[in-house]
Amino acid sequence: MVKLDSRKLKTTDKSINFARNDFPILQTQMNGQPLAFLDTAASAQKPACVIEAMNDIYKNNYSNIHRGLYNISQKLTEEYETARAKIARFVGAASEKEIIFTRNATESLNLIAQSWGRKYLKKGDEIIISGMEHHANIVPWQLLQDQIGIIIKTIPVLEDGTLDLEALPNMLSTRTRLVSAVHISNGFGTINNINKITEITKEFNPKIKVCIDGSQGIVHTPVHMQNLGTDFYVFTGHKLYGPTGIGVLYGRYDILETMPPYQGGGDMIERVSLEEGTTYKEPPYRFEAGTPAIVEVIGLGKAIDYVQTIGIPAIQNHERKLLEYGTEKLRAINGLKLYGPENPDQKAGIFSFTMDCAHHSDIGMILDQCGVAIRTGHHCCMPLMHRFSIDGTARASLGLYSNADDINQLAEGLQKVRKLFA
Ligand SMILES: Cc1ncc(COP(=O)(O)O)c(C=O)c1O
């Protein structure tokens, strides 16, 4: 493993340390200490350019979109649709018509389950998820299980925190209709081989749909839908340095075209008649009922511009160095157990750990006093925690703005935990 120290990271990653100044909140303190924000997997901080762009709309350019004939409404409509096209390019979609705006990844998955699932699945049909899914990629399918009687199978998680993909071919059957798996686990940081998942599935039967929960994946690795060959890919804006309240569902257009609306209301219709019923717009508008999150969509577009000025590969490289640095630091703490793969090629910037001397809630509270923000608990991955017979972990997660000082502050805080509890 590469040896790194805090000074070396700073000097080799000037652009990243410069980027840190773009985030106003990172210049503040928490409990009288510099804020070491290590909870990006839960939600990322926002760069000033995103905050300012959104403020600017509310101050100078706000109106509803799509239906206004006046100047500011038309301008904002154009900005909104430009953001859609930008997101389509960012994820390598074939067209902007494949990008549906939702509230978050959770809503994107519920949309697939309730629109595609209710149309295409019958009692006894099988879907396959994995044992490391976020609840957002479990519960929507369990709702369908209750509503229709589908069967849910689960790809097992191995002891090293990776998926047992060798098991997948034997789990596929003539009843399998969908495989839905997480790209990067928010629980342990495991990077799943989604190309392999897609390949195995499509080789068995190209008609089986593949859905990827990219909520963490899109933040840490480049993605390209046309190269990947997945049918659906979902993510949430607030983890990608954008605002809350905006999520994305990428869907292959020929599939979206056949799916019924998820919700009904304004903006998604062609014609409404009390006598003859209603006809619906084409995707993506068919799935965007009501006034959308206009300012948030444009804010997400700005966040993507921002991320692209640094570049996902540069972010990946920076986070990789920090992951190796942090792993070494945490391994040096007595009684600390790290979960997830040891191989940094298989892991994104997430340190999920327990300590033999203290419960994860105690760890979180002590770290708070040290200015270190981490998350504790099951991370909405109860089945994953259950698999490892734990009720939760302490989780420190990296973002593009993280640096070695954050890690050092975390390690010092953990030494304090040891002193207090051991
Ligand atoms: C892997 C993964 N999937 C889904 C979600 C749900 O995201 P949201 O709450 O924004 O819908 C999260 C959020 O933590 C996540 O990490």
Image: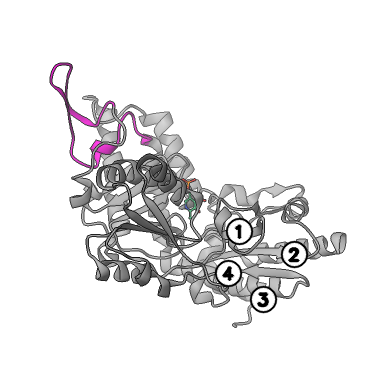
Q: Earlier in the sequence, mark 3 or mark 4?
A: 3
Q: Is 236 within the magenta?
A: no
Per the rendered image, the range of residues in magenta is: 265-294
For mark 1, give the secondary structure.
helix
- Which percent across, then down, holds residue 112? 33, 46
Q: Earlier in the sequence, mark 2 or mark 1?
A: 2
Residue 355: numbered disc: 2
> Does residue 66 lie above or below 112 as drawn?
above
> Does residue 324 lie above or below 178 as drawn?
below
Contact? badges 3 and 4 (CB < 8 Å) = no
User: Which residue: 52% across, 61% down?
Assistant: 400
Name the foreground residue: 285 vs 118. 118
Q: Residues within 10 Å of mark 3 (few under 14, many from 20)?
A: some
Which residue lies under the disc numbered 4?
Answer: 340
User: For this view, does 283 lie left or right of residue 104?
Assistant: left
Find the residue positioned furthest to the top: 274
Contact? badges 2 and 3 (CB < 8 Å) = no
Which residue lies under the disc numbered 1?
Answer: 386
Q: Is 282 within the magenta?
A: yes
In three-dimensional space, the C-alpha distance between marks 3 and 1, rounded to whole angstroms, equals 27 Å
